[in-house]
Amino acid sequence: MSCTNQLTPVVLCGGSGSRLWPLSRAGFPKQFLVLSGQYSLFQQALQRVNALAAPDLHIQTTLVVTHEAHRFLVLDQLREFPALQATLLLEPESRNTAPALTLAALQALQAGGTDPILVVSPADQQVGNVKQFVSILQQAARIAAQDQIVILGVPPQRPETGFGYIHFDLTPGQFGEHQVLGFTEKPDEATARHYLAQGHYAWNSGLFVLKASVWLRALEHFRPDILQATRLAWERQTQDAGFVRPDAGLFAQVPGESVDYAVMERCPGTFGMCMLPLEVAWTDLGTWDAVWQQGASDESGNVIHGDVLLEHAQRTLVHATHRLVGVVGTEDLVIVETPDAVLVAHQNKTQQVKALVAQLESRGRQEHLLHRKVYRPWGWYDSIDEGTRFKVKRIQVKPKSSLSLQMHHHRAEHWVVVKGTAEVTCGDRVVLLTENQSTYIPLGEVHRLRNPGTIPLEIIEVQSGSYLGEDDIVRFEDHYGRGQDSL
């Protein structure tokens, strides 16, 4: 193990995080949220897997597998790490983690010219002792260099029914690894208690390390249909501006399956697989009770974020984003406030938040898709108010950025500049507006808003018309390569 091994960190950045609604939405899922500290969960994952370099471990380009709709969120958050080299593999639709990892393995083999070791991490976890975490992953990479599949198992702290379990041999190997005997996905509470008492079961962290060729060989053995379909879509990829896009039509035909079900649970006894104990503070932030468990609590077990007042509350999580929230006499509750939705749930029922999201979708509502404040590659907009035939937005445009050249069939717009300088194209006219100046965009007029300055531009937009949906856009020119489906 003394030779230099090539590493390719892979961050799986898909999923909608519906159980963390209303903070997590399809258009801004949980991996991009800053739930504590300075960085989002995605950014924390990036930092951890890019800290693995050692004399015998050389890091190649990081691969981020994400949904096409989230590409600009990823780019924005990557800008905080200018020295980090990353390639974005864009899924046109979600097909679960097995196709996502297959895209990464194919890309890593092509880009590296070698058979790199993939260090695969979800984008939605928190880790306490990062130094120890990095040391364990480095050891996993050295074991994986011997064609082993190495999975990281978390010593269970409680009879958790929301995680998968790894059954392992108690006798450690030369490098502290344990042979994997089997998997159980999300057992009932009685079974989870039995596993906890047995002592040779660990939580499946979703973190694993293996060579790209080993993954492809295992997938070909167990699920050749996934490998063949994914390879076809990847071979007909297009590339632009650092994005790698598999063929959308072919990718839609890829069977959707998780890494665990497709390969990992079938490997014991067929492929070399071992587990390293992940003996660090680890949290899979899949539900609000998990957020409460990892938060900094007061003497009554309460965890708060934002403008919150408590009186006689115990073991309560309150997350306020927009206004003051007062709580009196509660126990074991989760209360999450956003500008357009409020969640109140019992701690032991937070797994069922996903059912609320399903209700929103079935009723044709929009609160599961987007926040009131929506981020775009050029900045963001916040829908302040709306009623019959009108809508009011606050819009911020980044310096040197612009919206697309566009027109609307059903609405006119009034713009008032409140901060910065606006360059407004309206028909064949181009004008500059500064603070307190305004303009009118008639229905059907081709127009564009641009920020030529060095500070953010903010405007108030008042729309009026018979239809005010975001899909009323005819786009003529766009710097971000978007179609008709986004502003």
Image (spheres, grey):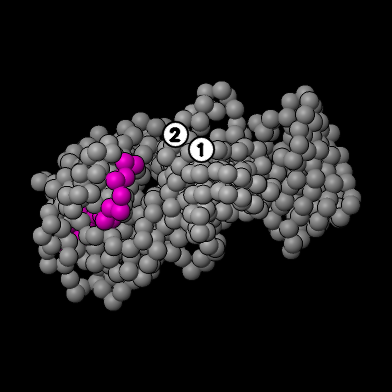
Q: Is residue 411 magenta?
A: no
The residue that appears at 51% across and 55% down in the rendered structure is 300
Residue 317: horizontal and vertical position, in percent? 52, 48
Identify the residue position indicated by label 2 in the image: 352
List the single residue furthest toward the bottom. Answer: 55
The residue that appears at 80% across and 45% down in the rendered structure is 460
Look at label 2 and name its amino acid: Gln
Majority secondary structure of magenta residues: loop
Which type of secondary structure does the marked residue at label 1 adopt? strand
Tell me which label, 1 or 2, sits earlier in the chain. Answer: 1
Residue 57 visible from this viewpoint: yes
| 401 and 125: which is toward the camera | 125
The residue that appears at 49% across and 28% down in the rendered structure is 358
CB contact under 8 Å: marks 1 and 2: yes
- The magenta span reads 144-163
Identify the residue position indicated by label 1 in the image: 345
Residue 105: horizontal and vertical position, in percent? 30, 51
Residue 166 visible from this viewpoint: no
Q: CA distance from mark 1 to mark 2?
A: 9 Å
| 467 and 102: which is toward the camera | 467
